[in-house]
Image (cartoon, rainbow, N blue to C red):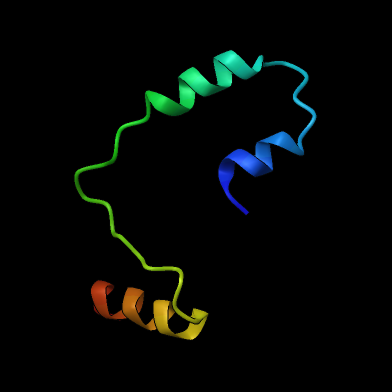
Amino acid sequence: MSFKNGCKSLTIQFITKKLLNSQFYTLEEPANAMYVDVSEPPQVFVENIRTALGI
């Protein structure tokens, strides 16, 4: 399920759709983020994370 589809199924009481969209689009990627391909089976991406972290 995508973020957009997930939001459609939520009842948002304190924020308008327009405000939520503006907040989402102003997010910046962190410079030190780890990118994980979650299309792989969970055991594969968990192992990739562990390897990247050296654990």
Q: Quadrant of residue 30?
A: top left
Is residue 51 positioned above or below 30 on the image?
below
Is residue 16 positioned above or below 9 on the image?
above
Q: Residue at x 43, y 78 (%)?
A: 46
Count of marks, rendered view: 0
User: Can you give x and y, in whole percent of width and height, for residue 36 in the image?
Assistant: 35, 65
Is residue 53 positioned above or below 30 on the image?
below
Residue ranking furthest to the left: 31
Q: Quadrant of residue 6?
A: top right
Is residue 11 positioned above or below 5 on the image?
above
User: Can you give x and y, in whole percent of width and height, for residue 42 in the image?
Assistant: 51, 79
Image-based side of 47 in relation to 13, left or right:
left
Where's the N terminus, which quadrant? bottom right
Q: Residue at x 45, y 68 (%)?
A: 38
User: Can you give x and y, in whole percent of width and height, for residue 15 in the image?
Assistant: 67, 16
Where's the C terminus, which quadrant? bottom left
Image-based side of 17 in relation to 38, left or right:
right
Image-based side of 3 in relation to 8, left or right:
left
Q: Residue at x 58, y 49 (%)?
A: 2
Q: Residue at x 37, y 30 (%)?
A: 27
